[in-house]
Image (spheres, helix red, strand yellow):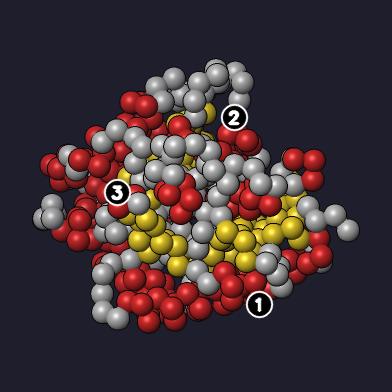
Amino acid sequence: MKRTITIGLMSGTSLDGVDAVAVDFDEDRARFLGHAYLPFEPDLAQELASLCLPGDNEIDRMGRAALRLTERYAQTIESVLAQVGVDKSRVLAVGVHGQTIRHRPQWGWTLQLNNPADLAERLGLDVIADFRSRDMAAGGQGAPLVPAFHQCVFQSPTVSRTIVNIGGIANLTYLPAQDRPVIGFDCGPGNTLMDAWNLKHRSTPYDNDGAWGARGRVDFDLLNRLLSDPFFSAPYPKSTGREYFNLEWLARFAPCTAPENVQASLRELTAISIARAIQNDAPDTREVFVCGGGAFNRRLMQSLREALGGGATVSTTEALGIHPMHVEAMAFAWLARQFCLRRFGNLPDVTNARGKRILGALYPA
Ligand SMILES: Nc1ncnc2c1ncn2[C@@H]1O[C@H](COP(=O)(O)OP(=O)(O)O)[C@@H](O)[C@H]1O
Ligand SMILES: [Mg+2]
């Protein structure tokens, strides 16, 4: 039996849970087979969040959290396999991003919490993990890694497009119509600040549809001070995480307005920082496609349209045939396949690595 099915697994900075997809890559075309999502138990999400910042006894806590994480990963993978009804003998490999708890490109290292040996043992499948380290070893940012996949499935020969992934952090991929390099970088916070502020004031994981923030008024003084953070004006390549954009970061700007007004201002921060990144670095973009959970925040999507001022249409990747919550996990399925075929996974123009590299490490079945 030919092994053509690859499983991609993503758990991002939002710490909401795990997305797994099964993709059939026969003949080099990506055919989506199925998706499964399992949320994190609240105490696991909390422990993962606290591991993103320095704290006591981190090494023991990290080891234990990694095992809980891979148990959840294994459940999500078994769930997607059961759902699509494929036998493991048809699975080429599982590509597992892991849970980023530190990302330090300035110091040349990044850490995605994971226990791929445990995962290989539980699943009896080849597991490919640790995709970012090799790009960093070659002098790159180790991120973003999704642009090569975006280029493969979303680029148009006639119209310049930008794909915006609004997860915990927002990152974009500019896909020029003409033969110019693809650009990709993190443009700042996606949902992470809105989620954290919402959790603090309303004890729910996120502001459904942006409805709470929509009841607030934007505090333009606060917004402008937030936008003056040097990350936003720094040139790419650049990448960031929740170890930078978090409630301590927000507290430095001493917001002193009603909580819903802060939420509205955080929504505009996300929308405007994305729009400015597109206007500055991808100015001929005519079509913007959003993926990640932010695509479901209708108020945020409206703000993004307003911030772009009609220069480009804004829709979700659904319009291009891929559900917004499947894109990132599909990218890691694709990256795992690249590894198996000993093909490169990074775009040096994006990450600033010295060259193309095969990304990941194999934990055999
Ligand atoms: N209906 C919705 N309304 C508002 N925000 C949403 C909605 N659905 C998802 N989200 C946001 O999307 C986030 C999850 O997005 P995801 O792409 O999984 O991010 P990550 O890759 O960082 O895990 C949630 O934490 C939430 O902020
Ligand atoms: Mg997620």
Question: Cα distance, mark 1 to mark 3?
Answer: 35 Å
**Which mark is nearer the camera, 1 or 2?**
1
Closer-to-camera residue (113/355): 355
| Position of residue 270 measured from the top left corner of the image (x, y, whole percent) | 32, 44
Residue bearing mark 2: 155
Where on the picture, by quarter, is residue 100? bottom left
Residue type at numbered disc 3: Gln
Q: Is residue 227 above or below residue 78?
A: above
Residue 111 visible in the snapshot: yes
Q: Which numbered disc flags the more N-terminal residue, 1 or 2?
A: 1
Left or right of 158 on screen, residue 125:
right
Residue at image location 49% in from the left, 25% down from the top: 181
| Position of residue 13 measured from the top left corner of the image (x, y, whole percent) | 41, 59
Closer-to-camera residue (124/25): 124
Q: Provide the secondary structure element on which disc 1 rests.
A: helix
Residue bearing mark 3: 106
Residue type at numbered disc 2: Gln
Residue at image location 20% in from the left, 40% down from the top: 230
Quadrant where the C terminus is found in the figure: bottom right
**Which mark is nearer the camera, 2 or 3?**
3
Left or right of 254 on screen, residue 349:
right
Q: Are marks 1 and 3 in contact (CB under 8 Å)?
A: no
What crowding class fits label 2: few (fewer than 14 Cα within 10 Å), some (14-19), or many (20 or more)?
Answer: some
Left or right of 161 on screen, residue 232:
left
Q: Which numbered disc flags the more N-terminal residue, 1 or 3?
A: 3
Q: Which numbered disc flags the more N-terminal residue, 2 or 3?
A: 3
Mark 2 close to ligand 1, CB under 8 Å: no
Question: Cα distance, mark 2 to mark 3?
Answer: 31 Å
Q: Are marks 1 and 2 in contact (CB under 8 Å)?
A: no
